[in-house]
Image (cartoon, rainbow, N blue to C red):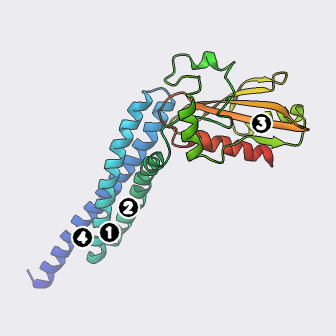
Amino acid sequence: MTAHSKSTQSLSAHSLRTSRLALTGFSLSVVCALLASLAGFGSRWGLWHFRVGLIIMIGVLLGGLVAVVLSLIGATVTRQGGSRRGLVWALLGLLIGLVVVGLPLSLVIRGRRVPPIHDITTDTETPPPFVAILPLRQGVDNPSEYGGAEIARQQRIAYPNVAPLMLDVTPEQSFERALTAARDMGWEIVEANPREGRIEATATTFWFGFKDDVVIRITPAGGGSRIDVRSVSRVGTSDVGANAKRIETFLHKLGR
């Protein structure tokens, strides 16, 4: 066997090993992506408790990190070895792995930046109370009663922009606009009571299917109306900022 033949075989074996490494990283990243989707949608579809889905996400995060490392090594080695196909697998695995790792990691980072509260309202002194939704909240983890001064203090620090909206239209007009905006947000309307100026609805998150309840209160204010909103999660100590964002988005839509 000539030196050239030995060199060719050695290069071929090296290319095969590096391609396998790149393919392993890619395959693991795809598996983690599928598990991430299943973790959330399985909870939404009632296949398991949402805490099981969160445990799966921890495994996804760890698996995604391994996939990123394998893909990064695979990309480096295959590029040096000249294996174009291996490089493609490695880059795809790296891309998918970064997305898989980035999603849960962003939630963890966001959760550490906001207080562990799940009840947000534009009026912390006299929060809008739930009426029609109360039967739907029986047996859930989080109470319907407002948590008091400490919750209000944490909200003011974390979400200073959550405040009542003043509109220069009658309460009746504000009620119709608020109802339309709530429907546009994709919320399930539980009750719309124009006489009391109260709208109650449930918002369901896309991925895990978490249900957060919303109550809107419209009251006369001078020659116009005042809109107060309260959004409360049914489960979970922290909402990772979801309720505040929901209220701000709704009020922005209503005030346009």
Q: Residues within 10 Å of mark 2 (few under 14, many from 20)?
A: many
Residue 31: x %, y % from top left = 37, 47
With respect to residue 9, does 59 lie above or below? above
Instruction: In this rendered view, identify the residue nearer to me: 203 or 19.
Output: 203
With respect to residue 173, does 76 lie above or below? below
Q: Residues within 10 Å of mark 4 (few under 14, many from 20)?
A: many
Q: Residues within 10 Å of mark 1 (few under 14, many from 20)?
A: many
Mark 3 or mark 2: whose residue is earlier in sequence: 2
Question: Residue 144's quadrant in the figure?
Answer: top right
Instruction: Identify residue type, mark 1.
Output: Ala
Instruction: Identify residue type, mark 2.
Output: Leu
SS of the residue under disc 4 = helix
Which residue lies under the disc numbered 2?
94
Mark 2 or mark 4: whose residue is earlier in sequence: 4
Mark 2 and mark 4: Cα distance apart in space: 19 Å
Instruction: Identify residue type, mark 3.
Output: Ile
Q: Is residue 106 rendered to the left or right of residue 72?
A: right
Mark 3 and mark 2: Cα distance apart in space: 47 Å
Number of numbered discs visible in the structure rendering: 4
Determine if residue 206 is in view.
no
Mark 4 or mark 3: whose residue is earlier in sequence: 4
Q: Residue at x 32, y 49 (%)?
A: 63
Q: Residue at x 89, y 35 (%)?
A: 173
Are the residues flagged by discs 3 and 2 in contact, CB closer than 8 Å?
no
Are the residues flagged by discs 2 and 1 in contact, CB closer than 8 Å?
yes
Which residue lies under the disc numbered 4?
15
Q: Nearer the viewer, mark 2 or mark 4?
A: 2
Instruction: In this rendered view, identify the residue nearer to me: 210 or 150.
Output: 150
Mark 3 and mark 1: Cα distance apart in space: 55 Å
Which residue lies under the disc numbered 1?
75
Question: Residue 166's quadrant in the figure?
Answer: top right
